[in-house]
Image (tube, rainbow, N blue to C red):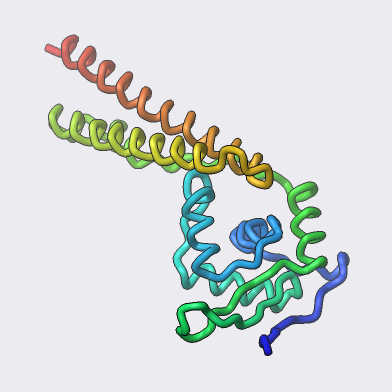
Amino acid sequence: MAEHRTSGATSGDERPALPATSWAVLGLLSFGEELSGYDLKKWADWSLRFFYWSPSFSQIYGELKRLEKAGYATSRMVAQETGNRGKRVYRITDAGLEAVRTWAREAPVEPPVLKHGVMLRVWLGHLLEPEQMREVLGRHRAYAESMRRHAEADVEGARGEEAWAYPALTLKWAERYYAAERDLADAMLADIEELHRRQP
C-alpha cells in the first residue's frame, strides 16, 4: 500500500509567503504530472534553466518540503519496476493549483536584473590587454551559441505536446535571447577593433 504524506492546506487569506523558487517548483507540478525530485530537476533543466533557475537536488527537495507543509503538494512512495527501493513522487493539490494560479495572475512581476559579468569586464577594459578582451568576448559568444542550440533542441522536443505549448514559447524566447547575446558579442568585438584602430 502506498504511503501518503499531506499537510493541511491554508485558506486564501492565510496564504504563506513563499519565495519565487517555491512557485517555480509548484509551477512544474501544475502540469498535472506526478513527479519525483529527479523528474523535477530534469524538467527544470529542460526549461527553467534558460531564463530563471537551475536548481540543485537539495534545493528541489527543500522546496517540496515547503510546499507540502503549506498544503500545496502531496507525496507518496511508489515501487520501482527495477526492484530497487521505492521513490517518492509529488503531486499538486487543489489548493496548490489555486495558489499558483493566483500568484501567476496577481503577484507583481519584477523586472529582470542584469548582472552581466562580461559587460563588467568590458567596462574594465582599460585594465586588460586587447587579446584578453577578445578572449572574454569569444568565450561568451561560444557560450551564448551553445545555449541557443540547447534551447532550439528543447523547442523541437516540445513540438506537438499541447500541454507544453507555453513552456515551448519561453524556450523560443530563450533561443532568441541567446542569439542576441551571440550577436552582441560579435558587435562588441567589432567595436573594440574599431576603438583600437583609433587609438594612437
Q: In x, y percent, where is residue 123?
A: 31, 32
Up/down of 83 relative to 113, above or below: below
- Res 134 quadrant in image: top left
Residue at the far top in the pictured view:
198
Asked if 93 appears above or below 151 in the picture, the reply is: below
Residue at x-position 32% and y-position 37%: 118
Q: Quadrant of the C terminus?
A: top left
Viewer-side residue, 172 vs 103: 172
- Which of the two residues, 56 or 156, is positioned nearer the viewer here? 156
- In this view, the residue in front, 155 or 28, is 155
Residue 111, by quadrant, is: top right
Q: Which of the image's four quarters has the N terminus?
A: bottom right
Seen at 55% across and 74% down, the residue is: 62
Q: Position of residue 63 (x, y in %)?
A: 59, 70
Question: Position of 43 compared to 161: left or right?
Answer: left
**How many numbered badges does the structure rendering display?**
0
Question: Based on the displayed image, in which of its 4 quarters is residue 179 positioned?
Answer: top left
Instruction: Please report the residue visible at 46 percent of the width from the left and 69 percent of the height from the top.
Output: 57
Residue 113 spot, x, y in % from top left: 52, 42
Locate residue 74, reporting x and y percent: 71, 76
Q: Nearer the viewer, residue 100 or 77?
A: 77
Q: Is residue 84 rendered to the left or right of residue 25? A: left
Residue, x 30% and y 22% (percent of image)? 186
| Res. 170 visible in picture | no
Residue 135 shows in the view: yes
